[in-house]
């Protein structure tokens, strides 16, 4: 590996870098807040989808074993998905679950303006 070469910045460069660091440090709390809100919104959307799947499973009188045999997903994994509010399933898992109930998973994208 090559040797790292370090050059002292000029006074002007150092001042510019300091200003950039200050601007970034001012924005960090807002960026973190926005990221947290986005994660929470995704978590709620996933929870709602899983709640709909569970409700339909119960409505159809299907057990976890029934879903497991139709999807290849273990009963324990399905139970964790349905009961763990922090679950983060893949789209493939949700699609398999939905198809086992003769449902279709629909994902939409919109441009935020």
Image (cartoon, rainbow, N blue to C red):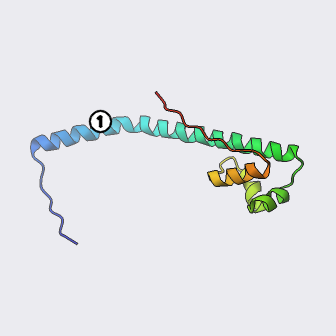
Horizontally, residue 60 falls left or right of residue 27, namely right
- Dot 1 falls on a residue whose secondary structure is helix
Residue at the image point whose x is 66% and y is 51% from the top: 87
Front residue of 23 and 44: 44
Query: What x and y, as percent, mark residue 107?
Result: 61, 41
Q: Name the outermost residue toward the right.
A: 61
Front residue of 111 and 51: 111
Query: What x and y, as percent, mark residue 31?
Result: 43, 38
Front residue of 77 and 31: 77
Residue at the image point whose x is 76% and y is 60% from the top: 76
The answer to whether residue 40 is seen in the rendering is yes
Q: Quadrant of the N terminus?
A: bottom left
Q: Dot 1 corresponds to which residue?
A: 23
Residue at the image point whose x is 64% and y is 54% from the top: 92
Front residue of 83 and 54: 54
Query: What x and y, as percent, mark residue 50?
Result: 72, 45
The answer to whether residue 88 is seen in the rendering is no
> Which class describes the residues within 10 Å of circle 1: few (<14), some (14-19), or many (20+)?
few
**Quadrant position of residue 17:** top left
Horizontally, residue 91 falls left or right of residue 19, namely right
Residue at the image point whose x is 53% and y is 33% from the top: 110
Query: What x and y, as percent, mark residue 9?
Result: 12, 49
Q: Name the outermost residue toward the top.
A: 113
């Amino acid at each position: 590996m090559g040797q790292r070469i370090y050059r002292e910045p000029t006074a002007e460069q150092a001042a510019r870098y300091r200003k950039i660091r200050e601007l970034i440090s001012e924005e960090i709390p807002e960026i973190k807040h926005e990221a947290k809100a986005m994660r929470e919104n995704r978590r709620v959307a996933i929870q709602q989808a899983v709640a709909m799947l569970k409700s339909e499973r119960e409505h159809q009188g299907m057990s976890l074993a029934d879903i497991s045999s139709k999807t290849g997903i273990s009963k324990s994994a399905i139970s964790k998905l349905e009961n763990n509010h922090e679950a983060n399933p893949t789209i493939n898992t949700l699609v398999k679950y939905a198809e086992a109930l003769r449902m279709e998973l629909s994902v939409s994208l919109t441009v935020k303006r």
